Amino acid sequence: MRGVAVIGVGVTKFGKHERTCAELFAEAAADAIQDAGVSPRAIQAIYYGNVVGGEGEHQLHMGPQAASVLGLPTIPTTRFETACATSHAAFRHAVMEVAAGVSDVLLVGGAERVLNLPTDAATEYFTYASDATFEQPAGMTFPGVFALIARAHMAKYGTTEEQMAHVAVKNHRHGALNPKAQFQKEITLEQVMKSAKIADPLKLYDCCPFTDGAAAVVVVSEEVARKSRKPVWVRASAAASDSMFLHDKKDLSRVLATERAAQAAYRQAGCGPEDVDVVELHDCFTIAEIVATEGLGFFEPGTGGIAAEKGWTSLGGKLPVNPSGGLKAKGHPIGATGAAQIAEIVTQLRREAGPRQVDGAKVGLVHTLGGNTATVLVSLLASE
Amino acid sequence: MRGVAVIGVGVTKFGKHERTCAELFAEAAADAIQDAGVSPRAIQAIYYGNVVGGEGEHQLHMGPQAASVLGLPTIPTTRFETACATSHAAFRHAVMEVAAGVSDVLLVGGAERVLNLPTDAATEYFTYASDATFEQPAGMTFPGVFALIARAHMAKYGTTEEQMAHVAVKNHRHGALNPKAQFQKEITLEQVMKSAKIADPLKLYDCCPFTDGAAAVVVVSEEVARKSRKPVWVRASAAASDSMFLHDKKDLSRVLATERAAQAAYRQAGCGPEDVDVVELHDCFTIAEIVATEGLGFFEPGTGGIAAEKGWTSLGGKLPVNPSGGLKAKGHPIGATGAAQIAEIVTQLRREAGPRQVDGAKVGLVHTLGGNTATVLVSLLASE
């Protein structure tokens, strides 16, 4: 297979917008195309991620709509949806199209808009990503799913609520350095610990927000990449699944799909967790970051909370995690999140992340999780 | 790139079902896996198509749900959505994954269920595949879109309502030979002409029905195909888009995305329309079949209606179109339609179509259209 690289990235401000998903995507896409230095006419297909546009905007078939709004209506498009992992899945399929030699220049990204909806409607639509037969009727919204995971991790390993709070404090500290982040303000451990209970033991500041936003990246063949400034190479892109049903999962303190996707990605890239310099991972809730840092092989099972507490995952620590602020502070426009994570790692590996730059970063890992731990994507990117 | 083949197909009965999309898909998938003669454990990824499951079943993230219900919860899955072309898009991306050498055995298909919904709800959700900014607020449902196309074709070429009616009569005659079809009864020209007006000039029998159903196919590498019975080879799979907006289309009597996708597919396969022996195409409305037979290069622009009237597209005619009964009589479970069309062509090229077999069929074409002519997929399959 051919080499594949990312040569351009674009991300809108995350937060509340009064624009459609297609319009948000067009902004991110135009920025990514300009950053890539390619002609818009060079793009051979658009890989578009969105989750709840049918429910929120009454808009399905969003691919050609986004292409039309972008001014590129004749470019073939496909919409991808794998819950919160949506645009990372789109990215992986795009990498395969380029690797297969079918295309040389692809535009990949996603958009989501929910802040125009009442909060209870947004909560309901997000819940559609969990099983409608068994779990939705039981009232199992995502804070509930991750509260169960937190309880399991606390019971098995002694992980504390304070350790989870450290994840929130750290990601807000990082987010304060990111001008695109939804929340650009630091918070204290006390604020997290005193915030309202959402689903015990998770409190308001353990949870990522609802967010509008879009992100896009330009994925190209090695031949095109060689002619561009600062290409970032795709060394691996792997997907894994686990049962949709919580009642099928034997150990809620682990996310098996993360472990499987990571193993596959390390195998593809011929490296291991010790080679990774910077990570963007799926911290939809603080416990999710702790479990992910273990599943990705960075810390032993049960020690992810300690790593957060000791600052190992902070900027300046031994393995900076979520320098962008993560889903927690940067925000989580679900259909755009994977592409935004990839954009952050590309920016880090190009050494263009300004005050949130991870010194000497050469290898970056992107981890995105969909639904109640049923879908996970892991990609490895490298500057060389 | 490597050779790619289809070695197994499965289609549920089309019509009304009291099962979820995931359960319908599991039936089709199990049949496809058995037909392929592969172990379920050999499947490396599931490509799953669905359009309105979020709206109709409150179920997004359907890939892992379908995999879990199928009993294969650890197989990576991606959901695809390109309106009515959804599972044909999934098929094209799966072909690229196999061609790229990433996988050898993939399960591809889709499911849709709408007959549990009130008809006005189903109509509304389908309309989400057209643009929400300009066209939905104007009341532009799909019968309206295709009525405009019919009027343009009639004005430009003199196509008649009787010629459109001939498409319906022919597809019902074919559907009567297909035990999986939703409507297995013949109809007369008079019945069509006297049926209720839906969107002038389209009448009830010019329109395909709402349908529940699922379809699946097993896509494999050449190496795997060589060990299986009667592989059918994928000679081309191409996608094309056109503007989402009707007001951008200069000539409603043509579907430019069909013409572009067909040209790309013929180029990939190194053949032309004259080499095609059997066709499954997107007859969501009778006029759509007429326009598609022209856009695919089978008949000169303006003569698709004459071809229908003269019986050239009937079983026994010079180019049988929609031997399955088409969307018109077989039914149109939108997320499953592309995979079902591919399953029919595979069945034809294996010479296993029983009373609806096209004699001597060696090359088949599949055409699927999404939304208001914004997305088109064309694939070419061959028995040799």
Image (cartoon, coloured by chain):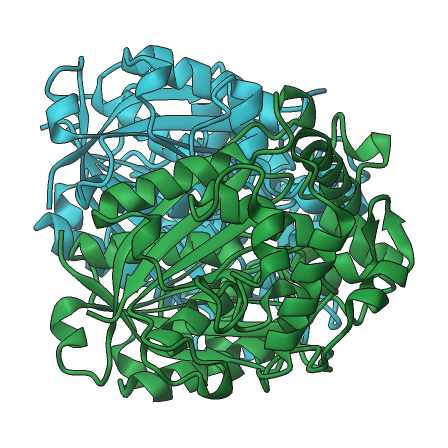
Chain colours: A green, B cyan
Q: Nearer the viewer, residue A297 or A80?
A: A297
Q: Residue at 57% across / 82% down in the picture?
A: A178
Residue B188 to residue A382: above or below: above
Q: Is residue A282 visible?
A: yes
Counting the numbered discs, the total is 0
Residue B180 place in picture, x, y as percent: 50, 18
Q: Is residue A317 left or right of residue B261?
A: right
Q: Is residue B306 left or right of residue B79?
A: left
Residue B332 place in picture, x, y as percent: 55, 36
Residue A233 place in picture, x, y as percent: 24, 66
Q: Residue at 33% across / 56% down in the picture?
A: A380
Q: Residue at 9% across / 28% down in the picture?
A: B384
Q: Nearer the viewer, residue A327 or A371?
A: A327
Residue A342 to residue A123: above or below: below
Q: Is residue A259 left or right of residue B19?
A: left
Q: Is residue B188 visible?
A: no
Q: Nearer the viewer, residue B91 or B247?
A: B91
Q: Nearer the viewer, residue B35 or B164?
A: B35
Residue B364 place in picture, x, y as percent: 23, 36
Q: Residue at 35% across / 17% down in the picture?
A: B41
Residue B14 to residue A379: above or below: above
